[in-house]
Image: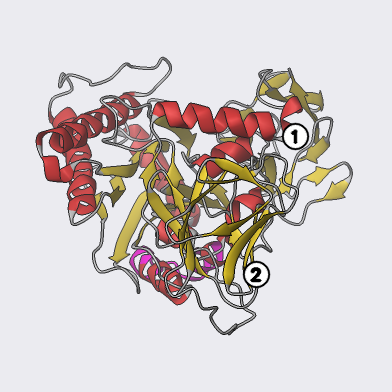
Amino acid sequence: MHIASGGATDVGTVRTNNEDSYRIVAALNLFVLADGMGGEAHGEVASSLAVETVVRHCLDGQKDPNTPLSGEAKPGLTEKSRRLASAVHLANQKVFTSAADHAEQRGMGATLTAAWIDGMDLSVAHVGDSRLYLLRTGVLQQLTSDHSLVAEQVRRGILTASEAESSTMQNVLLRALGTQPDVEVDIEQVGLFPNDVILLCSDGLTRMATEPEIAGTLQSEPDPQKAAQKLVRLANEGGGVDNVTAIVVSLKSESKGWFSWLRRGADKSVGGNGTAGGH
Amino acid sequence: MAKLSLMFEDKLVKEVPIGSKPVRIGRSPDNDLVVDNLAVSNDHARVYFDAGRLVIEDRGSLNGTFVNDLRVERATLHDGDSIWIGKHHIKVDAIGDAPLQYQSPKKTSAPMINETMVLDTKVRREMLQQAAAMGERTQFASDRIKVPTMVVLSGKTDAKEYILTNKLTTIGKSAMATIKLKGWFKPAMAAQINQRDDGYYVGSGAKTPAVNGVAISGPTKLNDGDLIEVASIRFNFIVRE
């Protein structure tokens, strides 16, 4: 499977500083996005600290699989999912400790959404109201749950989805990194298919653009870097009242037609490349 | 310029100027100041100028309107007064007192620029409990654990039924599929089911599924008892409690 990716971020048209952070680690197929909060420049501190901590811990785990895991391990998770969950727990501790140690950083926090692709397995770790979408056969599907008050009210049947969209309480989060000593991390594991497109984005996109607009942009622009830039533009054209960040990842078959049959045969005869097997 | 400032947790949620028209406060979206909480009535209260005085009038709300901790039906407001509606606090800024000229019929929309905030555990629990206590629809929700299940009625699959536990359930022949189809001509990825906040949605894959005999035209919300047919396999979507 060939994986191509691109990312873009923008301060938006209203705010003066960008509190979003993201990293693409192409060598690991690791994608991390965080949306910071807390006045002055501290949202930026929180989101970049969170992203860097997640990336560092995954790189460490890749180099040395014995790197200790943080937080409790849930059963039934792949190695990558466990490492990713651990990385988010660690990021939470780092942001929480930094806020506790620096009076001026009090109240800072961040959302965090991370995706790690291993062969055909996608691991997603998530806290907050940034989102991960999977576009497959033209259907845009959200693989993360927003940890916001309105989303929780929808899940409990108190609000309808459309009531939630027009709510004035959309900015109230129930979970974020760095506000408590420990945090519950959502982990999702999904099997991938060729031609799947993955989108990680901050709420600056999903509040400014509709899901059909997002799906349309992803479908009409095959180049992930250009698609990410177009999504950022879409958010700014829709009002741009918040920072906006998008990471687009697309999966393509390495080769097409009868040639792939030959290649698959060849790969098998030499024992594969280590990503195709093991399921 | 006189104005009302809707506060929540000591943070400013929204400001509305008080013009020559009454400021309508309530939960339904057509109000000038929408307070989105179930403790708030759809048409809760109004604030307006009457003979040069700023007045608040309760519209027969269920949970009442409070000015400086006193429940009121109609009261004169003064600069610095606090209005309480549910857990929301509205600060009264009456400096100038003169009514503004009514300018635009366009409602000031909710500012989305406001800072993101996180509720601590205690406040969160209180808010959700309060919301649950107020919610008309909650008698059916949350108490019992719901188990959404795809029961195979006919066709070859690797199990007789599947409990939907993930955000995405894939139906197909592929090894990556959750609901595995058997047979030569089955597609690798026939259809998919996405769990969203308000329920489960079936979407197309290589095939277009039919729900209760009708081919879907986009992601379609499943209801308890729905019949789903895809790639010649028939399923029943059942929510067990």
| Pointer 2 residue | B22
Which residue occupies the extreme left position in the image?
Answer: A101
A247 w.r.t. A279: above or below: below
Magenta span includes A221: yes
Residue positioned 72% across, 46% down in the render: B61
- Between disc 2 and disc 1, the foreground one is 2
Report the predominant secondary structure element of the magenta stretch: helix
* Identity, as a three-letter code, of the amino acid under mark 1: Arg
For the record, the magenta segment spans: A215-228
Label 2 environment density (alpha carbons within 10 Å; few <14, some 14–19, many ≥20):
some
Label disc, if present, on residue A164 of the rendered structure: none
Q: For this view, does A266 lie left or right of residue B189? A: left
Report the chain holding disc 2: B
Image-quadrant location for residue B193: top right
- Front residue (pair B60, B112): B60
Q: Residue at x 55, y 37 (%)?
A: A152
Chain for numbered disc 1: B
User: What residue did someone put label 1 on?
Assistant: B137
Residue B69 located within the stretch drawn in magenta: no
Q: How many marks?
A: 2
Q: Nearer the viewer, residue B194 or A121?
A: B194
Residue occupying image coordinates x 83% and y 35%: B226
Residue at image point 17% right, 19% down: A68
Q: Position of residue A204 (x, y in %)?
A: 41, 60
Q: Quadrant of the C terminus of chain A?
A: top left
